Amino acid sequence: MGAALWSIAAGVAYYVFRRAEGWSAGAIVGAAVLSHWVLDRVVHRPDLPLYDNSLKVGLGLWNYPAFAFVLEITVLFGGMSVY
């Protein structure tokens, strides 16, 4: 829930400061902020709280450095192809 609120706040803030680029640019910024949490869920061990530290999630890819490195490189170069 917190990640979604941060995403909305980032998108709105971007729109406020860069109004000429429109809401679509703000939506892209918001999506980028939200995607950070999604990717953190993949690589973190179960230490990301969903609510009030009672339920923590994470798939623990960091325990396998080779796979984590391949994922990071894929995300880095996959994101570059968009531009």
Image: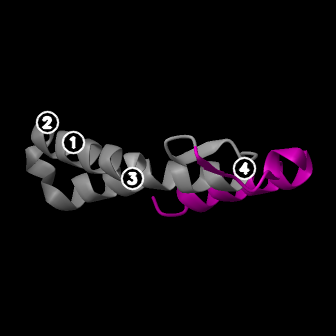
On the image, numbered disc 3 is attached to which residue? 1
Q: Quadrant of the C terminus?
A: bottom left
Q: Residue at x 31, y 48 (%)?
A: 5
Q: Residue at x 27, y 58 (%)?
A: 27
User: How far apart, in angstroms, are the residues tagged by discs 1 and 2?
Assistant: 5 Å
Q: Quadrant of residue 10?
A: top left
**In the rendered structure, which disc, 3 or 1, sits on the residue that comes first in sequence?**
3
User: How far apart, in angstroms, are the residues tagged by discs 1 and 4?
Assistant: 28 Å
SS majority, magenta? helix
What is the number of the mark on residue 43?
A: 4
Residue flagged by tag 2: what amino acid is it? Answer: Phe
Which numbered mark, 1 or 4, is in the foreground of this view?
A: 4
- Residue 35 belongs to magenta span: no
What is the number of the mark on residue 17?
A: 2
Verify CB contact (< 8 Å) between mark 3 and mark 1: no
Verify CB contact (< 8 Å) between mark 3 and mark 4: no
Residue flagged by tag 1: what amino acid is it? Answer: Tyr
Stretch of the chain drawn in magenta? 54-83
User: How far apart, in angstroms, are the residues tagged by discs 2 and 4?
Assistant: 32 Å
The residue positioned farthest toward the top in the image shown:
17
**In the rendered structure, which disc, 3 or 4, sits on the residue that comes first in sequence?**
3
Verify CB contact (< 8 Å) between mark 2 and mark 4: no
Verify CB contact (< 8 Å) between mark 1 and mark 2: yes
- Residue 66 belongs to magenta span: yes
**In the rendered structure, which disc, 2 or 3, sits on the residue that comes first in sequence?**
3
Give the image location of residue 56, x and y in percent.
Answer: 63, 49
Give the image location of residue 49, x and y in percent.
Answer: 57, 44
User: How far apart, in angstroms, are the residues tagged by discs 3 and 4?
Assistant: 19 Å
Question: SS class of the residue under badge 4?
Answer: helix
